[in-house]
Image: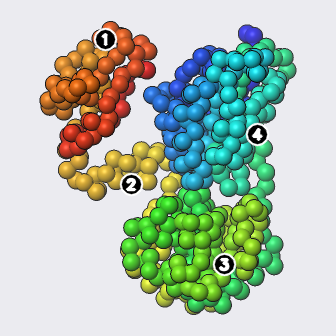
Amino acid sequence: MTRTGAHLVVEALAAAGVRHLFSLSGNQILSLYDATLGSGLSILHTRHEAAAVHMADAWGRLTEEPGVALVTAGPGHCNAISALYGALMAESPVVLLSGHAPTGQLGRGAFQEMDQAAVAAPVCKASWMAKDAARLGEDIATALELARSGRPGPVHVSLPGDLLEAKVAAGAGARAPRREAAMAASAAEVEQALALLAAARRPVILLGGAMARGPRRAAVARFSDATGVPALPMESPRGFNDPWLHLAAPLLGQADLLVLLGKKPDFVVRFAQAPAVAAGCRMIQVDADAASLRAGAALGIVADPAVVTDQLAAAARGRAWSHRAWGDEVARAGDGAGRVGGRAPVDADADPSAPGLRGDPAASRSRRDPDRRRRRVRPVGAGRARGGDPSDQWPRGLHRQRDPDGDLGQAASSRPPGDRGGGRRHLRVPRLRARYRGALPAAGGDGDR
């Protein structure tokens, strides 16, 4: 078999343990689809490029392993960009692979030519275009390493079509991503942090997105249990105003020491300034990115927050601490919000669909709205594609409603009824939402694009 650059990409993904590609097909990436045959990689096909990135984002958050999205060039790439912002804010390990115009045609008006790396750069940890077919495997391995290391986040690589189709030497092989040793704090930094903690009366631990998940969250629970200091995940942009905090939110204004573990002192925490916290509140900041440390902090530690948290928990164990009454007060006011163990962490090896896990949206919806369990969720647009009666698929009367622009909410395909090919169905969502807000909940159908 002739090996191509596309095979190097697939082999690098497989060597790294990637099992799924979340994708929407297009001309520029068809060679990658062919290369996955027999590789063990599955392709989960979506209806929109942003959906592919959202799915990769969810995979990254639930497993702490990079979720990989694969989209085509130009407009396909641009469609995926908005979803990268959510992954960046959530500190989710995501790799976006985009097809790209051939390198030999750049600057000459190539099909879907644009500077894709520059478009993705503001919402990525790193973004670049591959330039050598023989080194495509290295590009993929590097992207996976960057996505999971330090502060996790999205990484983008554009893959020109001529590199993917280029023949490569038989000796070119894939390497597994290197796992660099996580940075730890010095013994002096650990002691200084614990001294500041002991001197504070009302300290609070605030967590970044990655520190609130999986094994990192377990390390925080050990630290909080050892000292009695309340620990609060700052996962929502509402920050101190998050309804999840309940009555604990006003208590944060009394904090005289903030321990930021992988959390930037940004708008989410009101920039860690009064009146959001007590006047003169001090700050300990632990971050893998030196650029995220704020000047003027009582202590800034450039190291892996998860490793430092384990160091702090081990050093704090067995010492006398006076913060348990404060921690209990925050936990009671917040209905358990101050206890990191109050919401069970997601087991990376568990089935994300298992009941009770954070990844079980059906369970959470049922708890909020018990009647929802008795409702029927009907796929929008599935009726006509299957040749069925539209009244069996749409809320009653929806397919009969008309407006000056045509059928309200009508599923229209560019192919004949029953054809499962590339026809796209169009839905006038605003009118559907406005006039049928009380109708059955809608879910995406399973027809092809």
Of callouts 2 and 1, the N-terminal one: 2
Q: Which mark is residue 142?
A: 4
Task: Describe residue 162's horizontal placement relative to residue 34 as left or right.
Answer: right
Q: Which of marks 1 and 4 is nearer the N terminus?
A: 4
The C terminus - image quarter: top left
Residue 420's quadrant in the figure? top left
Asked whether 330 or 159 is in front, the reply is 159
Q: How crowded is mark 3: few (under 14 residues within 10 Å), some or many (20 or more)?
A: many
Q: Is residue 122 visible?
A: yes
Q: In the rendered structure, find residue 283 and report the number of the disc placed on it.
A: 3
Quarter of image, res 428: top left
Circle number at residue 136: none
> Label 1, on which residue?
418
Q: Which residue is drawn at 53% across and 81% down?
A: 275
Q: Which residue is drawn at 44% across and 80% down?
A: 250
Q: Distance between the residues labelled 3 and 2?
A: 35 Å
Residue behind mark 2: 356
Q: How far apart are marks 1 and 4 (CA)?
A: 44 Å
Tell me, yes or no, whether the two marked residues, 3 and 2, touch with CB atoms within 8 Å: no
Nearer to us of marks 1 and 4 is 1
